Image (cartoon, rainbow, N blue to C red):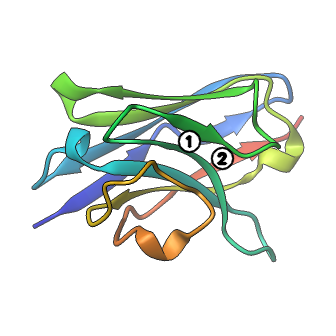
Amino acid sequence: QLQLVESGGGLVQPGGSLRLSCAASGFTLDLYNIGWFRQAPGKEREGVSCISQRDRTTIYADSVKGRFTISRDNGKNTVYLQMNSLKPEDTAVYYCAADVRTRRTCTIATMSLYGYWGQGTQVTVSS
């Protein structure tokens, strides 16, 4: 059974940092494009970042560029999202997802490509 589990969310003050983890079971994350998405209350889910299987290309939403970093640890079968300089507008439930079908460079513009999703982890940025 293919499963993704996010962890690392929590409450942090503005300017603080968190590192989210996305651990996989039942498949090898390194073989697929992996994306991070988020959904704030009352808003649509949006793409945050992704990392490509093929060429390790990383993509970031404009709102998080320079503050967030996506990375893989193949030995742990885990993808991370390091989030620095957090802002209140980063508050959301964060989801990781795997695109197990395509072999192109990853994209965060088309969520329907991602067939496997974790349950999400809450990130709250507040003083």
Q: Mark 1 points at which residue?
A: 9
Marks 2 and 1, Cα distance to the nearest angstrom?
5 Å
Mark number, residue 123: 2
Q: In which quarter of the image is residue 116?
A: bottom left
Q: Identify the residue shown where x is 72% and y is 46%.
A: 61
Depth check, front residue: 29 or 113? 113
Mark closer to the chain start, 2 or 1: 1
- Check if mark 2's residue and mark 1's residue have beta carbons within 8 Å: yes
Q: Identify the residue shown where x is 37% and y is 33%.
A: 55
Q: Identify the residue shown where x is 47% and y is 51%.
A: 106
Q: Identify the residue shown where x is 43% and y is 71%.
A: 113
Q: Quadrant of the C terminus?
A: top right
Q: In this view, does 41 lie above or below 49?
A: below
Q: In this view, does 7 lie above or below 15?
A: below
**Quick one: SS at disc 1?**
loop
- Number of callouts in the render? 2
Q: What amino acid type is highlighted by mark number 2?
A: Val
Q: What amino acid type is highlighted by mark number 1?
A: Gly
Label 2 neighbour load within 10 Å: few <14, some 14-19, many 20+? many
Depth check, front residue: 70 or 11? 70
Q: In this view, does 48 lie above or below 58?
A: below
The spot of residue 105 in percent (x, y) is 45, 48
- In this rendering, would 40 be left or right of 117? right
The spot of residue 60 in percent (x, y) is 66, 40
Depth check, front residue: 89 or 98? 98
**Quick one: SS at disc 2?**
strand
